[in-house]
Image (tube, rainbow, N blue to C red):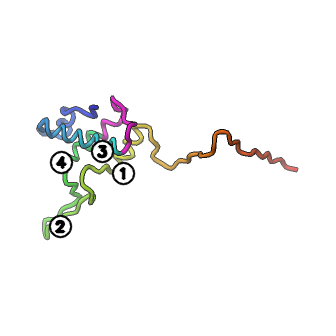
């Protein structure tokens, strides 16, 4: 499945990339997406998926360690996450889930059997 083309990634980053770098960024992005939304990711991808995918891939290539902040004096570095690999931000996760038709908020599910009919009470003033 092609989430984006190498040309699109090169254009966004405005720098030359090898085919291997593009392929690795694509594969890591696809793995993260499938891990998040599973089989809901269609081929070709739904509208809105490419925008998230190319931004995630660009981040993979520009900040592979997930560095969040750095300080020169005292050499202090902080990282976005203690996990290794590609971690989607909350915004990326929300946008991806919306693009594939998953709800992003709270919802309720009825677990009552289909033959169960809720009792109906009609209230009338006396």
Which of disc 2 and disc 1 is earlier in sequence?
Answer: 2
Residue drawn at x 34%, y 32% is 45
Q: Residue furthest bottom?
A: 74
Helix, strand or loop status at disc 3: helix
Q: Is residue 68 left or right of residue 21?
A: right
Q: Which residues are magenta?
A: 36-52
Residue 124 versus residue 100 in the image, above or below: below
- Which numbered marker is on residue 90? 1
The quadrant in which residue 120 appears is top right
> What is the CA distance from the residue labelled 2 to the residue labelled 3?
29 Å
Which residue does the numbered mark 2 point to in the structure image?
Answer: 76
- Find disc 4 in the rendering and name its residue: 62
Q: Which mark is residue 32?
A: 3
- Earlier sequence position, callout 2 versus callout 3: 3
Q: Would residue 9 appear left or right of 118 to someone viewing this image? A: left
Mark 3 vs mark 4, CA separation in Å: 17 Å
């Amino acid at each position: 499945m092609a989430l984006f083309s190498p040309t699109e990634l090169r254009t966004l980053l405005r720098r030359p990339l090898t085919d291997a770098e593009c392929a690795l960024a694509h594969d890591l992005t696809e793995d993260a997406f499938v891990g998040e939304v599973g089989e809901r990711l269609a081929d070709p991808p739904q509208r809105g998926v490419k925008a998230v995918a190319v931004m995630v891939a660009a981040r993979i290539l520009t900040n592979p360690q997930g560095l969040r902040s750095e300080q020169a004096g005292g050499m202090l570095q902080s990282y976005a996450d203690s996990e290794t690999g590609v971690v989607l931000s909350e915004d990326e996760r929300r946008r991806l889930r919306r693009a594939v038709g998953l709800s992003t908020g709270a919802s309720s599910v009825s677990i009552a059997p289909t033959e169960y009919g809720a009792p109906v009470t009609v209230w009338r003033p006396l």
